[in-house]
Amino acid sequence: MLVYGRNVAKEILKNNKIVKKIILQKDFSDKEIISLIEKRNIKVEYLDKKEFSRFDKFSHQGIILDIEDFCYTDYSLFFNEDNAKVVILDHIEDPHNLGAIIRTCEAAGITGVIIPRNRSVDVNSTVMKTSAGALENVKIAQVTNLVHVIGELKENGFWIVGTAMHSDTDYRDIDYTGKIALVIGNEGKGMSKAVTEECDFVAKIPMYGKINSLNASVAAGIMIYEMISLDK
Protein backbone atom coordinates (compact mmCIF):
# COMPACT_ATOMS: atom_id res chain seq x y z
CA MET A 1 0.00 0.00 0.00
CA LEU A 2 1.31 3.46 -0.90
CA VAL A 3 0.88 6.16 1.74
CA TYR A 4 1.60 9.86 1.44
CA GLY A 5 2.58 12.83 3.59
CA ARG A 6 5.10 13.82 6.26
CA ASN A 7 3.03 13.22 9.41
CA VAL A 8 2.10 9.73 8.26
CA ALA A 9 5.71 9.01 7.31
CA LYS A 10 6.99 10.09 10.73
CA GLU A 11 4.56 7.86 12.61
CA ILE A 12 5.31 4.85 10.41
CA LEU A 13 9.07 5.29 10.66
CA LYS A 14 8.97 5.83 14.43
CA ASN A 15 6.82 2.74 14.99
CA ASN A 16 9.19 0.50 13.04
CA LYS A 17 6.47 -0.62 10.63
CA ILE A 18 7.90 -2.56 7.69
CA VAL A 19 8.62 -0.17 4.81
CA LYS A 20 9.39 -1.73 1.43
CA LYS A 21 10.54 1.44 -0.27
CA ILE A 22 10.47 5.22 0.07
CA ILE A 23 10.09 7.66 -2.81
CA LEU A 24 11.35 11.19 -2.18
CA GLN A 25 11.25 14.32 -4.28
CA LYS A 26 14.84 15.38 -4.94
CA ASP A 27 14.49 18.64 -3.01
CA PHE A 28 12.93 16.94 0.05
CA SER A 29 14.49 18.54 3.13
CA ASP A 30 12.69 17.38 6.28
CA LYS A 31 15.69 16.61 8.50
CA GLU A 32 13.75 14.55 11.05
CA ILE A 33 12.36 12.21 8.39
CA ILE A 34 15.70 11.93 6.61
CA SER A 35 17.34 11.00 9.91
CA LEU A 36 14.69 8.33 10.60
CA ILE A 37 15.21 6.87 7.12
CA GLU A 38 18.96 6.76 7.56
CA LYS A 39 18.69 5.06 10.97
CA ARG A 40 16.53 2.32 9.48
CA ASN A 41 18.63 2.00 6.32
CA ILE A 42 15.58 1.94 4.03
CA LYS A 43 15.91 1.97 0.27
CA VAL A 44 15.08 5.40 -1.21
CA GLU A 45 14.16 6.28 -4.77
CA TYR A 46 14.55 9.94 -5.74
CA LEU A 47 12.38 11.59 -8.39
CA ASP A 48 12.60 15.13 -9.72
CA LYS A 49 9.64 17.48 -9.39
CA LYS A 50 8.36 16.71 -12.89
CA GLU A 51 8.43 12.95 -12.30
CA PHE A 52 6.78 13.39 -8.90
CA SER A 53 3.93 15.40 -10.43
CA ARG A 54 2.02 12.23 -11.30
CA PHE A 55 1.33 11.85 -7.57
CA ASP A 56 0.15 15.43 -7.04
CA LYS A 57 -3.51 14.49 -6.47
CA PHE A 58 -2.46 12.73 -3.25
CA SER A 59 -1.01 15.80 -1.44
CA HIS A 60 2.20 13.86 -0.96
CA GLN A 61 4.41 16.66 0.47
CA GLY A 62 7.35 15.16 -1.38
CA ILE A 63 7.32 11.71 0.26
CA ILE A 64 5.67 8.38 -0.50
CA LEU A 65 6.07 5.15 1.46
CA ASP A 66 5.38 1.68 0.12
CA ILE A 67 4.25 -0.33 3.17
CA GLU A 68 2.45 -3.58 3.92
CA ASP A 69 -1.34 -3.52 3.91
CA PHE A 70 -2.99 -2.52 7.18
CA CYS A 71 -3.23 -5.30 9.77
CA TYR A 72 -6.65 -5.47 11.43
CA THR A 73 -7.19 -6.44 15.08
CA ASP A 74 -9.32 -9.23 16.56
CA TYR A 75 -12.28 -7.42 18.16
CA SER A 76 -12.41 -9.95 21.00
CA LEU A 77 -9.34 -8.18 22.41
CA PHE A 78 -11.68 -5.33 23.40
CA PHE A 79 -13.76 -7.54 25.71
CA ASN A 80 -11.44 -7.74 28.70
CA GLU A 81 -10.54 -4.07 29.17
CA ASP A 82 -12.21 -2.41 32.14
CA ASN A 83 -14.44 0.51 31.12
CA ALA A 84 -13.60 -0.14 27.45
CA LYS A 85 -14.84 2.48 25.00
CA VAL A 86 -15.33 1.20 21.45
CA VAL A 87 -16.54 3.00 18.31
CA ILE A 88 -18.55 1.02 15.73
CA LEU A 89 -18.88 2.54 12.26
CA ASP A 90 -22.02 1.34 10.50
CA HIS A 91 -20.93 1.44 6.83
CA ILE A 92 -18.98 4.71 6.65
CA GLU A 93 -18.15 5.18 2.95
CA ASP A 94 -15.99 8.32 2.80
CA PRO A 95 -12.29 7.62 3.52
CA HIS A 96 -11.85 11.20 4.75
CA ASN A 97 -14.57 10.64 7.37
CA LEU A 98 -12.98 7.37 8.45
CA GLY A 99 -9.55 8.98 8.72
CA ALA A 100 -10.90 11.92 10.72
CA ILE A 101 -12.81 9.63 13.10
CA ILE A 102 -9.70 7.50 13.65
CA ARG A 103 -7.73 10.64 14.45
CA THR A 104 -10.32 11.63 17.06
CA CYS A 105 -10.34 8.10 18.49
CA GLU A 106 -6.57 8.19 18.92
CA ALA A 107 -6.68 11.61 20.59
CA ALA A 108 -9.42 10.45 22.96
CA GLY A 109 -7.72 7.17 23.86
CA ILE A 110 -10.54 5.00 22.52
CA THR A 111 -10.05 1.25 23.08
CA GLY A 112 -10.73 0.30 19.47
CA VAL A 113 -12.78 0.78 16.31
CA ILE A 114 -14.97 -1.78 14.54
CA ILE A 115 -15.86 -1.51 10.84
CA PRO A 116 -17.76 -3.88 8.53
CA ARG A 117 -16.01 -5.73 5.72
CA ASN A 118 -18.63 -5.03 3.05
CA ARG A 119 -20.17 -1.77 1.77
CA SER A 120 -17.70 0.25 3.82
CA VAL A 121 -14.41 1.98 3.13
CA ASP A 122 -11.29 -0.04 3.97
CA VAL A 123 -8.17 1.37 5.59
CA ASN A 124 -6.38 2.79 2.56
CA SER A 125 -3.87 5.51 1.73
CA THR A 126 -6.47 8.29 1.94
CA VAL A 127 -7.59 7.12 5.38
CA MET A 128 -3.95 6.94 6.47
CA LYS A 129 -3.26 10.47 5.22
CA THR A 130 -6.40 11.97 6.76
CA SER A 131 -5.68 10.35 10.11
CA ALA A 132 -2.34 12.25 10.15
CA GLY A 133 -0.52 9.15 11.36
CA ALA A 134 -3.01 8.35 14.15
CA LEU A 135 -3.87 5.10 12.41
CA GLU A 136 -0.59 3.61 13.64
CA ASN A 137 -1.83 3.91 17.23
CA VAL A 138 -5.47 2.77 16.92
CA LYS A 139 -6.71 -0.83 17.02
CA ILE A 140 -9.22 -1.43 14.20
CA ALA A 141 -11.21 -4.62 13.70
CA GLN A 142 -12.91 -5.46 10.41
CA VAL A 143 -15.89 -7.81 10.78
CA THR A 144 -18.37 -9.63 8.57
CA ASN A 145 -21.56 -9.04 10.59
CA LEU A 146 -22.02 -5.99 12.80
CA VAL A 147 -25.21 -7.28 14.42
CA HIS A 148 -23.47 -10.50 15.48
CA VAL A 149 -20.52 -8.57 16.90
CA ILE A 150 -22.82 -6.19 18.79
CA GLY A 151 -24.46 -9.26 20.34
CA GLU A 152 -21.05 -10.49 21.50
CA LEU A 153 -20.22 -7.07 22.92
CA LYS A 154 -23.45 -7.16 24.94
CA GLU A 155 -22.60 -10.62 26.25
CA ASN A 156 -19.30 -9.18 27.46
CA GLY A 157 -20.84 -6.33 29.41
CA PHE A 158 -21.07 -3.52 26.85
CA TRP A 159 -23.92 -1.05 26.57
CA ILE A 160 -24.63 -0.07 22.95
CA VAL A 161 -25.30 3.61 22.22
CA GLY A 162 -26.48 4.46 18.72
CA THR A 163 -26.88 7.86 17.08
CA ALA A 164 -29.82 9.24 15.08
CA MET A 165 -31.14 12.70 14.24
CA HIS A 166 -34.74 11.85 15.15
CA SER A 167 -34.20 10.34 18.59
CA ASP A 168 -35.90 11.88 21.62
CA THR A 169 -32.84 11.28 23.84
CA ASP A 170 -30.23 14.02 24.18
CA TYR A 171 -26.71 12.55 23.98
CA ARG A 172 -25.80 14.37 27.21
CA ASP A 173 -28.49 12.52 29.17
CA ILE A 174 -26.93 9.07 28.76
CA ASP A 175 -24.75 7.43 31.40
CA TYR A 176 -21.50 6.41 29.69
CA THR A 177 -19.85 4.73 32.67
CA GLY A 178 -18.63 1.18 32.23
CA LYS A 179 -18.13 -0.57 28.89
CA ILE A 180 -19.67 1.40 26.03
CA ALA A 181 -19.83 0.78 22.29
CA LEU A 182 -20.81 3.90 20.34
CA VAL A 183 -22.36 3.39 16.89
CA ILE A 184 -21.95 6.05 14.18
CA GLY A 185 -24.16 5.52 11.15
CA ASN A 186 -23.63 5.89 7.41
CA GLU A 187 -23.18 9.45 6.08
CA GLY A 188 -26.48 9.46 4.19
CA LYS A 189 -28.66 6.70 5.64
CA GLY A 190 -27.58 6.66 9.26
CA MET A 191 -27.64 3.39 11.19
CA SER A 192 -29.20 0.37 9.54
CA LYS A 193 -32.51 -0.90 10.94
CA ALA A 194 -30.90 -4.12 12.19
CA VAL A 195 -28.17 -2.25 14.06
CA THR A 196 -30.64 0.29 15.49
CA GLU A 197 -32.74 -2.53 16.94
CA GLU A 198 -29.68 -3.83 18.82
CA CYS A 199 -28.93 -0.49 20.51
CA ASP A 200 -29.69 -0.04 24.22
CA PHE A 201 -29.91 3.73 23.72
CA VAL A 202 -30.22 5.93 20.63
CA ALA A 203 -29.03 9.49 21.11
CA LYS A 204 -29.30 12.71 19.16
CA ILE A 205 -27.13 15.82 19.05
CA PRO A 206 -29.50 18.82 19.25
CA MET A 207 -29.44 21.16 16.26
CA TYR A 208 -29.99 24.84 17.05
CA GLY A 209 -29.27 26.36 13.66
CA LYS A 210 -30.91 26.05 10.26
CA ILE A 211 -28.85 23.03 9.18
CA ASN A 212 -30.35 19.82 10.57
CA SER A 213 -27.38 17.46 10.43
CA LEU A 214 -23.64 17.20 11.07
CA ASN A 215 -20.86 15.57 9.11
CA ALA A 216 -20.31 12.00 10.37
CA SER A 217 -16.81 12.74 11.64
CA VAL A 218 -17.95 15.89 13.48
CA ALA A 219 -20.85 14.04 15.11
CA ALA A 220 -18.48 11.23 16.06
CA GLY A 221 -16.10 13.70 17.68
CA ILE A 222 -18.83 15.22 19.84
CA MET A 223 -20.13 11.81 20.91
CA ILE A 224 -16.69 10.32 21.56
CA TYR A 225 -15.64 13.09 23.91
CA GLU A 226 -18.95 12.92 25.77
CA MET A 227 -18.49 9.15 26.09
CA ILE A 228 -15.03 9.45 27.69
CA SER A 229 -15.74 12.55 29.82
CA LEU A 230 -16.34 10.62 33.06
CA ASP A 231 -13.21 8.49 32.62
CA LYS A 232 -10.74 11.36 32.21
Image: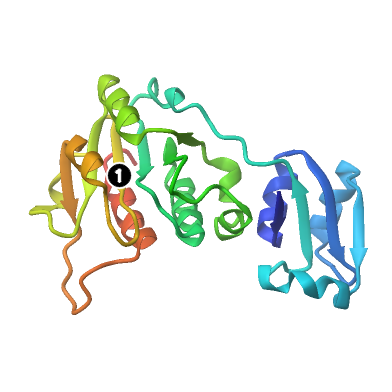
Q: Amino acid at mark 1?
A: Val
Residue occupied by mark 1: 183
Where 210 falls versus 179 (above or below)? below
Work out whether residue 177 can be spotted. no
Viewer-proximal residue, 109 or 9?
9
Viewer-proximal residue, 139 or 108?
139
Tell me where residue 155 sits by quadrant: top left
Locate residue 64, reporting x and y percent. 77, 59
| Residue at the (69%, 62%) spot, across then down | 5
In the image, 73: left or right of 222? right
Locate residue 204, reporting x and y percent. 17, 56
| Residue at the (28%, 44%) spot, across then down | 227
Q: Hey, which residue is sitting farthest front in the picture?
A: 119
Where 121 falls versus 195 (above or below)? below
Badge 1 element? strand
Where 116 falls versus 99 (above or below)? above
Locate residue 98, reporting x and y percent. 47, 54
| Residue at the (15%, 41%) spot, across then down | 201
Viewer-proximal residue, 109 or 97?
97
* Colouring scheme applied when the structure was drawn: rainbow
Tell me where residue 8 sits by quadrant: bottom right
Mark 1 residue crowding within 10 angstroms, few (<14) / some (14–19) / many (20+): many
Q: Quadrant of the C terminus?
A: top left
Viewer-proximal residue, 18 or 89?
89
